[in-house]
């Protein structure tokens, strides 16, 4: 549920990538804020800058200019170590291409995301299993990524992001590889966690239907915001 406290301020961020002789203007001046407890969807065509924007919000990368302030801290101006610490303590991340460790099982892939914070082995196993169960793949706990379907691997990545129980959850196209029914179940689960725990959720998606569970949707085009829509539903 959205509170009236502003959690994230994005101030005129631009991001250029240099590729040989060419400069790609991936973000061309983006500003908006995100409220504490908000469920925000980010939509836009392939190449519009969605992943680039998430990378700035999660401090995986820094903007070329502009600022991103999270809970009063300017994360666009941090050292690499500070950014690593910020990610570890403040955000749960679900990547577009899963980023699972091929030599670890599904369960171990979830455990490794929280192992620094949970020292007790049994508690670690219990927490990881719980989230595998929530995303419906506890029966694959001992499978390696190569022994799972794309959608199952995607759900391991979601479980890993959720298991951290971070105040901010950032997901990049978390249901891109799932069938409609499983996808709906995942969005419902995210909405439920958002409502129950008050976690702020920022999710990139191609599915316009997600706008219905989100409090607000932001539409990107060519590195700029070209539309914002508030959800009509109260809930
Ligand atoms: N590391 C990079 N080096 C050079 N160009 C990049 C790099 N990463 C992204 N780009 C370019 O920046 C633009 C935005 O890319 P981005 O990955 O943010 O798009 P996206 O909206 O996430 O697309 P998709 O829906 O396909 O995942 C694209 O033109 C892309 O080619
Ligand atoms: Mg992307």
Image (spheres, rainbow, N blue to C red):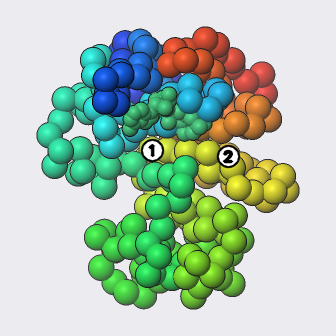
Q: Residue furthest right?
A: 181
Does residue 186 appear left or right of residue 50 in this picture?
right
User: In x, y percent, where is residue 171?
Assistant: 54, 46
Q: Secondary structure at mark 1?
A: strand
Of mark 2 and mark 1, the one earlier in the sequence is 1
Q: What residue is shown at x 64% (from left), y 13% (from top)?
A: 227
Decide: marks 2, 1 in contact (CB < 8 A)? no
Residue 14, disc = none
Q: Quadrant of the C terminus?
A: top right
Q: Residues within 10 Å of mark 2 (few under 14, many from 20)?
A: many
Q: As displayed, is residue 169 above or below residue 112?
A: above
Where is 150 relative to 104, above or below? above
Res. 67 in view: no
Q: CA distance from mark 2 to mark 1?
A: 13 Å
Q: Which residue is mark 2?
A: 191
Q: Nearer the viewer, residue 135 or 123?
A: 135
Q: Does 122 sit left or right of 196 as displayed?
A: left
- Residue drawn at x 54%, y 55% as measured from the top left: 97
Query: Which residue is located at x 71 percent, y 55 percent?
Result: 177
Query: On screen, 120 above or below 216?
Result: below
Residue furthest to the front: 21
Q: Count of labels shown?
A: 2
Q: Position of residue 27 (x, y in %)?
A: 43, 20
Q: Could you tell me if residue 111 is visible in this image?
A: yes
- Residue 133, given in percent of the width and then of the height, sits at 66, 74
Q: Considering the image in quadrants, where does the N terminus appear?
A: top right
The residue to which callout 1 is attached is 168
On the image, the x and y values in percent for residue 55 come to 40, 38
Would residue 123 appear left or right of 19 to someone viewing this image? Answer: right
């Amino acid at each position: 549920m959205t509170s009236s406290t502003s959690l994230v301020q994005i101030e005129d961020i631009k991001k250029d990538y240099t590729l040989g002789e060419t400069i790609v203007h991936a973000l061309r001046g983006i500003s908006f804020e995100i409220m504490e407890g908000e469920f925000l969807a980010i939509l836009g065509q392939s190449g519009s800058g969605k992943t680039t924007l998430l990378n700035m919000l999660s401090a995986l990368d820094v903007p070329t200019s502009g600022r991103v302030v999270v809970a009063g801290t300017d994360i666009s101006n941090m050292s690499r170590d500070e950014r690593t610490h910020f990610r570890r303590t403040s955000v749960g991340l679900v990547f577009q291409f899963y980023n699972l460790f091929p030599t670890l099982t599904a369960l171990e892939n979830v455990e490794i995301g929280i192992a620094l914070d949970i020292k007790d082995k049994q508690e670690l196993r219990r927490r990881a299993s719980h989230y595998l169960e929530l995303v419906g793949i506890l029966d694959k706990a001992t499978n390696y990524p190569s022994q799972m379907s794309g959608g199952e691997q995607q759900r391991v990545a979601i479980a890993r992001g959720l298991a951290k129980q971070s105040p901010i959850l950032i997901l990049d196209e978390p249901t891109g590889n799932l069938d409609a029914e499983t996808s709906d179940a995942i969005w419902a689960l995210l909405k439920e966690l958002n409502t129950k725990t008050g976690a702020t959720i920022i999710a990139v998606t191609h599915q316009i239907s997600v706008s219905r569970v989100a409090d607000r949707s932001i539409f990107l085009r060519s590195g700029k915001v070209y539309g914002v829509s508030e959800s009509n539903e109260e809930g």
